Image (cartoon, rainbow, N blue to C red):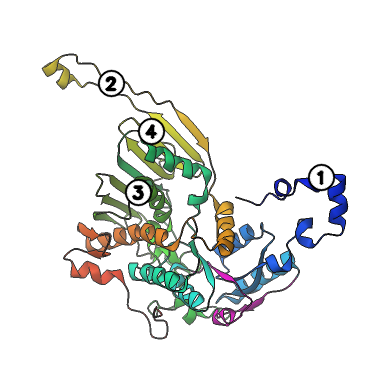
Amino acid sequence: MAIDHISRRGFVGTTAGAAFLAGAPAALKGGVAPADKVRLGLIGAGSRGGQLLGTFFGFPEAEFVAVADVDDKHAGETADRIEKQHGKRPESARDYHKMLDRKDIDAVVIATPDHWHVIPSLHAIAAGKDVYVEKPIGHNVAEGRALIEATRKHNKVCAVGTQQRSSNHFQKAVQEVRSGKIGKVFWVQTWNFENISPMGMGMQPDEEAPSYVDYDMWLGPAPKKAFNKNRFHLLFRWFFDYAGGMMSDWGVHLNDIVLWAIDQKGPKSVFATGGIMTTKDNRDTPDTLQVIYEFPNDVLLTYSMRKGNGLALNGHEYGILFCGTDGSLLLDRSGYDIIPDKIVEPYGIKAVYGERGVRKISIEPERMKGDDGGTPHARDFLDCLKSRKRPICDIEIAHHSTNTCHLGNIAYKLKRKLEWDVNGETFKNDREANAMLTREYRKGYELPKV
């Protein structure tokens, strides 16, 4: 929730209050006293980093004093923006390690490509910094587990950017599902549909990396590959070397809310099928995907993704549909709808047993508007830096949500149903699948020991 200076200082509007403020410190004039400032470093100053920067600018106590990005243009443009906002130019560099050596930085905000989420998070925590890291938290299951262990060992705050958890309407929707309002929930659908066929990104040739980019550092733990625009800024997420395709880019947001609503850490089994069916570009993640998760509490979740047809499901290009025995709850960032169901008596049953009557469903239609939760999510992180409480999307919560995406991608690669031990975080009796819970790290970019 955003700070409301007026409600917390109701005397401001009075004559006495105005006289008092004339000689008051900056914090009581609507500013923030130096001692109350939160000094932040930004690691990853590209598209998402810029979005987060704008969100944190809304809180006067948040001051960015350092920027790190392997792209000099990103770092420079972001430093310009921060200087304009704060009146002081931040330190900028390609390498984030210098930032972590600074004793005056309280926390870092990490918005790098996915394969660079966990390594700087671990380095930051070891250096005594709190962390806000973008989703998905890691490239693989082992990375997420390492980040949990480091966070707990060093008693740090580690918040993850699945910001829908901070949105009022997502919270209310979860409450409605958990309360039993729509009956027993047994089937949930999440989806992303759009049509980018047939070109997609197109087939781009390899080329020399720009001189203003440290491309070797950008690759980091990933295999050495020639520079290609399709594998670089913004588009990296369509390659398994760096990310997990649409499954982890958007599926993590959707499945995160599902796990919360059905009160589960993960599935007991997963199966996936799909492929590159409609786009003619050089991605290696699927453009068409169907994943089926079975949960111990008799809930079935399907994640569906297609890039070759944009017909909306129930009027939504993406979303979550909870189906219960009394009704359905349809949810996305614009809001939610509760849709009462209707009991029927099929012809066959009536023919055998005659008219028996059907139960009545008493719930009423309901609608609530919403938003993506980005602003209150940042507010929660800043509050936790002071309270030392765990954030609304603590690293452990986000780890389980991210794991659903890793599991879906592993099942897709292996093309078979996998049994998952959610507590041990291993596949049952499947050495090949378990080998995919981590990766081979390039020399010099290994996962730090916790």
Nearest the eye: 188 or 315: 188
Q: Which residues are magenta?
A: 88-112
- Identified by mark 2, the residue type is Arg
Residue furthest out toward the bottom: 444
Q: Which residue is mark 1?
A: 13
Q: Nearer the viewer, residue 186 or 235?
A: 186
> Which is more N-terminal, label 1 or label 4?
1
Label 2: state its secondary structure.
loop
Q: Is residue 110 magenta?
A: yes
Query: Does the residue at mark 2 contact the one at mark 4 (Cβ under 8 Å)?
Result: no
**Local secondary structure at mark 3:** loop
Tell me the quarter of the picture where residue 149 sits. bottom left
Mark 1–mark 3 CB contact (< 8 Å)? no
The amino acid at mark 4 is: Lys
Along the viewing direction, whichever of 3 and 199 lies nearer the viewer: 3
Q: CA distance from mark 1 to mark 3?
A: 46 Å
Query: In this view, which residue lies farthest toward the top?
Result: 355
Q: Earlier in the sequence, mark 2 or mark 1?
A: 1
Describe the element under mark 1 as helix, strand or loop: helix
Residue 344: x and y, percent?
A: 26, 22
Give the label on residue 181, or none. Answer: 4
Residue 266 pos. (x, y %): 31, 55
Judged from the image, the secondary structure of the residue bearing numbered disc 4 is loop
Residue 359 tag number: 2
- Quadrant of the rendering where the C terminus is positioned: bottom left
Residue 208 seen in this snapshot: no
Q: Between 346 and 308, which is closer to the camera in this rendering?
A: 346
Q: Which mark is residue 263?
A: 3
Residue 431 covered by magenta stretch: no
Earlier in the chain: of badge 2 and badge 4, it is 4
Task: Classify 10 Å Cα crowding around label 1: few (below 14), some (14-19), many (20 and above).
Answer: few
Residue type at tag 1: Gly
